[in-house]
Image: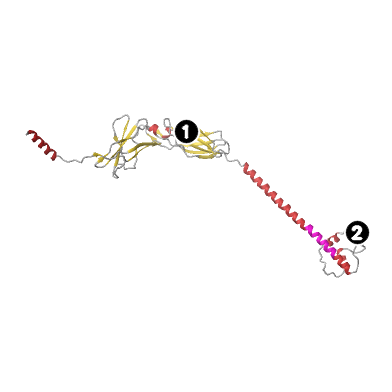
Amino acid sequence: MMGLWLLLLLHLHLGNAPRTEDVCVSLPAPSSISISSFNMEHTLSFLPGPGTPPETHFTVQIIHHRKNSWRPVTGCLELRAGQTCNLTRVFKDLYDHYRARVQAYTPTQTSNWTLSAWFLPLSDTVLGPPDVTVSGCGNCLTVQLRVPTKELPQNLQLKDLYKRIIFRVQRTRDGAQFTLTLDYEEENVITYLQSGVEYCVSVSATGSVSSNPVYSKPYCAFTSPPSTKSSCTLYVVLGLAGVFCMLGFLIIGLLIYGGQMSLKLPIHLTRRLSYILIQGQKRGSTRPELSGPFSASQLHETGSASCLLTAHSPVEAVNSSEVEEEDCGLVPN
């Protein structure tokens, strides 16, 4: 009987106790947890598990190697799917290892925690290339480097992490290239290059521990102004070609003009001789001879030569032979 009374009292006690909503573990756990870092900017990303409800939130916690307690990350307690968590401020020690975990939750459900791999800020960050300026210096190139100003924990600057610079130099003309590794300096000179030739330079940086170089885009410049010798030679050749063409056209024109003049001269002489024959027939005289009453000196006078070369039509009217003879200077002795 006592056992029955005890069971009855226990049942009544549990029935009068306040009810609480049970939280069960039934949500899919997040996946693909990763921490990426570029120039000491640390970012955590993740993917929701398959079948995660749209209203699900996510929370992030971190732990570092020297402590065994997890602590929440401010600003990453109510993340939505697709959002990331910035861990730059909570990873304060560059030489310590950190780890993060992510959990999905709703008002009535939670998921299991998903952990990331261990992360060391100093070695796992990727150093981006510095800003680059390239200029020529004769048979060399001057490369100016500038690292963005950024303060880091432990009183460090971002440029303090840059230890060595890798220069990848490529000649634009034929694509020949070589690499050169130098200690980080704001001003660097690449020597033993060809003068008047264009080169393109890409740079990447490595730290004392980090070994994930990322190259910049190519920056191009001539070692010195391009030579103008070839262009001057071209101008001289073109000028000479133009002169020779003009001379050729001039000679051809003179030849054509001279040929026309040589054709006109016999025609004038023929017309003049025909005129003399017609006049002789009209007078009933015989064919005139050059050995007549005219002297040789008269035949070779300047006036007579010009008269013979003057164009006259055979049908041209003439008043008297004396006038014609006087005009031509053919007066008998």
Q: Amino acid at mark 1?
A: Ile
Query: In the current view of this chain or complex, which residue is farthest to the top?
Result: 66
Instruction: Kindly indicate the quadrant of the structure image that contains residue 125.
Output: top left
Residue 86 or residue 51, whichever sits in front:
51
Identify residue for label 2.
296
Q: Quadrant of the C terminus?
A: bottom right
Instruction: Please check the rendered image and state whether residue 156 is part of the magenta-colored stretch, yes or no.
Output: no
* Mark 1 burial class by Cα count in 10 Å: few <14, some 14-19, many 20+: many
Q: Which residue is found at the position 40% from the left and 31% from the top?
A: 123
Q: Secondary structure at mark 2?
A: helix
Q: Which residue is found at the position 71% from the left and 51% from the top?
A: 248
Along the horizontal axis of the image, is 7 left or right of 59? left
As drawn, 106 above or below 305 = above
Q: Amino acid at mark 2?
A: Ala
| Cα–Cα gap, marks 2 and 1 | 106 Å
Identify residue for label 1.
165
The magenta stretch spans which residues?
A: 261-274
Q: Secondary structure at mark 1?
A: strand
Where residue 153 sits: x, y (%)?
Answer: 37, 33
